Image (spheres, helix red, strand yellow):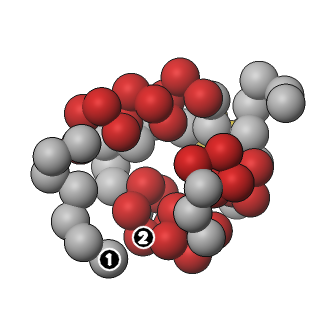
Amino acid sequence: MSKLLTREEASQYIGIDPKTFDKAFRADPDFKRFMLSDHTERYTIKSIEAFIDLKETTLKKI
């Protein structure tokens, strides 16, 4: 797995659907990402795991 994950790779790593990833992760301003261009984002496993730890008890139900 590469160091920077696409939306699909990140959602697969977590084990959720890409649309759920958009709602639970990408929509939250606390979720860190790399902006490669105006429309291209990438994510690290570290940022995904840190976000889960931060929001573990406060993630709203989707």
The amino acid at mark 1 is: Ile
Q: Residue at x 77, y 23 (%)?
A: 3
Q: Quadrant of the N terminus?
A: top right
Q: Check disc 2 and report the residue beneath it.
A: 23
Quick one: SS at disc 1? loop
Q: Is residue 23 left or right of residue 4?
A: left
Q: Residue at x 30, y 31 (%)?
A: 53
Residue 24: percent from left, percent from top = 39, 62
Give me the C-alpha separation between circle 1 and circle 2: 8 Å
Q: Is residue 7 left or right of residue 48?
A: right
Residue 38: percent from left, percent from top = 67, 54
Q: Residue at x 74, y 58 (%)?
A: 8
Q: Check disc 1 and report the residue beneath it.
A: 62
Where on the picture, by quarter, is residue 51?
top left
Pair 1/2: label in front: 1
Where on the picture, by quarter, is residue 42?
top right
Q: Is residue 37 left or right of residue 28?
A: right
Q: Is residue 26 left or right of residue 61?
A: right
Q: Residue at x 75, y 49 (%)?
A: 9
